[in-house]
Amino acid sequence: MKISLKEWPLIIFTVLVQTVVGFFVFLFVLVVINRHYFFGSASIGPFSRLFRPALSLLLLMGLSLIVSLFHLGHPSAAYLAITNLKSSWLSREILGSSLFFGGLVLLTVFIFLGCSPVLILIIAFLEVLVGLAMPFIMSKIYRLPAVPAWNNCRTTLSFYLTTFLAGAGCLPLAGRYFFSAWPGSTLARQTIIILQVSLFFSTGCLLLFDQVVGLFSLKSEIQPEKFQSLKKISKIRPGLLILAFLSSFFLSWPASSSWLSGFFWPALILALVIIEEIIGRAVFFNLYERLGV
């Protein structure tokens, strides 16, 4: 049995949204920690250092919303899905995604106009709060009593792990591309630390909650043939994360200039992380089996 990718719009949408959220959260943390670098020079201002990241996040979030329409039978009626906020987590997801997208639009415009750093940071902080709520809201859509493999805390945990792992995976490439001037090596070092901690923690959680007490504990709830296929492909994921973790040491290796003059190691790390997350999300959607069907 092969892994089915018929839910590819949901795979791409959920991974992409969570990546954007995690990327934004970590960028916000780095901006706050290094606020004197980003806002301290009156001659440069925040535009040259923050506009490209904000615009890139905006475009990625817009792309994720477009991809989500491919899963709808009637995309033109998508606006109707937001009309049931009281009882529908799907409606709340649409509202949260719209608010997050709107916040990115506002933030990008304010950076472009050179507004007050305090105002920019306030909007960014509110955006972080909305973003941190998104993985929880998205996970609640799938925690259905009729689908035992989804109806557990592992679903929520996996969505948050994707958020922080994929977001951290973007940082080296983003740092190399977005920030042409570095405050010594401080920002680069902070970026690498965030990446390595995220990779180490995520690999541990994957081995424990997915391989040991997660996927492997679902054997009685999934068809044997499907279970063996999912188990086999899921074993690839820790290897990809370990390879990404080992690659992260080349970002600051004194004998290598790739961090300062090339994109190879940052691009490789991001590719490994995204491939691992897409495999994980494909496995997740293939766990779907309703009780009584």
Image (tube, grey):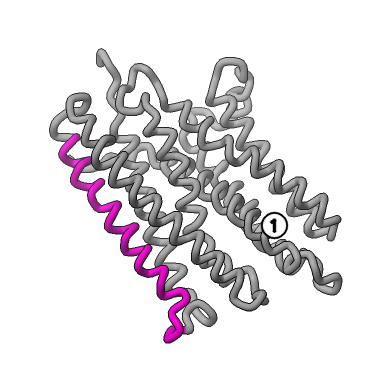
Residue pointed to by mark 1: 32
Q: Main secondary structure of the magenta part?
A: helix
Residue at 62 percent across and 24 percent down: it is 82
Q: Is residue 263 above or below residue 204?
A: below
Position of residue 200 measured from the top left corner of the image (x, y, whole percent):
38, 56
| Number of other residues with Cα within 10 Å of mark 1, as a class: few under 14, some 14 to 19, many 20 or more | some
Q: Residue furthest bottom?
A: 255
Q: In the image, is 28 to the left or to the right of 291? A: right
Asked which secondary structure carries label 1, the reply is helix
Position of residue 199 measured from the top left corner of the image (x, y, whole percent):
40, 56
Position of residue 28 measured from the top left corner of the image (x, y, whole percent):
65, 54
Residue at 41 percent across and 72 percent down: it is 249
In the rendered image, residue 164 lying in the magenta stretch gets the answer: no
**The N terminus appears in which quarter of the rendering?**
top left
Looking at the picture, tell me which residue is in the foreground, 198 or 262.
Answer: 198
The total number of labels drawn is 1
Residue at 21 percent across and 36 percent down: it is 216
Position of residue 176 measured from the top left corner of the image (x, y, whole percent):
56, 72
The stretch of residues the image draws in magenta is 227-256
Q: Is residue 9 above or below residue 57?
A: above
Report the amino acid beneath label 1: Val
**The C terminus appears in which quarter of the rendering?**
top left
Res 55 → quadrant: bottom right
Q: In the image, is 279 to the left or to the right of 72? A: left
Q: In the image, is 54 to the left or to the right of 215? A: right
Residue at 49 percent across and 46 percent down: it is 163
Q: Is residue 35 above or below residue 129?
A: below
